[in-house]
Image (cartoon, rainbow, N blue to C red):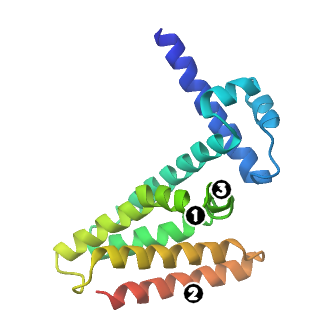
Amino acid sequence: MRRNKKDTDETIHKLREVARHHFTQQGYADCSLEEIAKSAEVTRGAVYHHFGSKKGLFRAVLELVQSEVAQRLEEEAALSDDLWEQLYLGCRAFVTVATEPKNKRIMLVDGPAVLGWEEWRLLDEQQSMRLLHGQLELVQQHGYLKHIRLEAATHLLSGAMNEAALWLAQIPDAADAAEAMEDCLQTLRMLLNGIR
């Protein structure tokens, strides 16, 4: 019985990793379950059994990507002992990590298109927005934040960062993208200082 559970977990893990590669390289629309199953060395039936559909598999991959992004945000924020700097470092990490090639197509382009805005937003709320809200709450408790409603601040900052990441992800020239990233990060720091 334990071996079956381990085999199942390994199959699910492999399918998500293989699907992530395909979704990243080709995009959701141009991937087929047959290709993914073949690359993962499983049957198409196994994909349906574990994920229900191509959309279900994509959702699992997006959850994995968002979980990894959230982990990176926490790691980056932890580089400082200063609570306010942790807020900036976490926000900066979101913009930079979301636009990495392995994340941007799945998280920013196909995610909202495939799952729909509401479901995509809900997944974002459970990961990155949750961390942002928690850090804003912490800096407010320690007197670093002006008297503002945390829900409003969380949604405004999250929306701004998502939009910035979407914009950055669409800039084809690397030099232009690097310059735009620098501009975004400077503006982000100014925005945060505005609520300090």
Residue found at x 44% / y 72%? 91
**Which residue lies under the disc numbered 3?**
106
- The quadrant in which residue 139 appears is bottom left
- The quadrant in which residue 52 appears is top right
What separation in Å lies between label 3 and label 2 (alpha carbons)? Answer: 24 Å
The numbered mark, 1 or 3, whose residue comes first in the sequence reads 3
Query: Where does the image place residue 43, in percent across and percent down from the top left?
Result: 75, 23
What separation in Å lies between label 2 and label 1 (alpha carbons)? Answer: 27 Å
Vertical position of residue 196 compared to residue 81: above or below: below
Towards the viewer: 101 or 67: 67
Query: Where does the image place residue 155, in percent across and percent down from the top left?
Result: 41, 74
Using the image, tell me which numbered label, if any, was put on residue 3.
Answer: none
**Which residue lies under the disc numbered 1?**
117
Query: Where does the image place residue 171, in percent across and percent down from the top left?
Result: 73, 77
Residue type highlighted by circle 3: Ile
Residue placed furthest toward the top: 1
Tell me if mark 2 has few (under 14), some (14-19) or many (20+) residues whose alpha carbon lies within 10 angstroms of its own. Answer: few
Residue type highlighted by circle 2: Asp
Query: Where does the image place residue 98, in percent across and percent down from the top left?
Result: 57, 64
Vertical position of residue 37 compared to residue 87: above or below: above
Q: Secondary structure at mark 1?
A: helix
Asked if residue 140 can be seen in this view, the reply is yes
Quadrant of the frame with the C terminus: bottom left
What separation in Å lies between label 1 and label 3 (alpha carbons)? Answer: 14 Å
Q: Secondary structure at mark 3?
A: helix
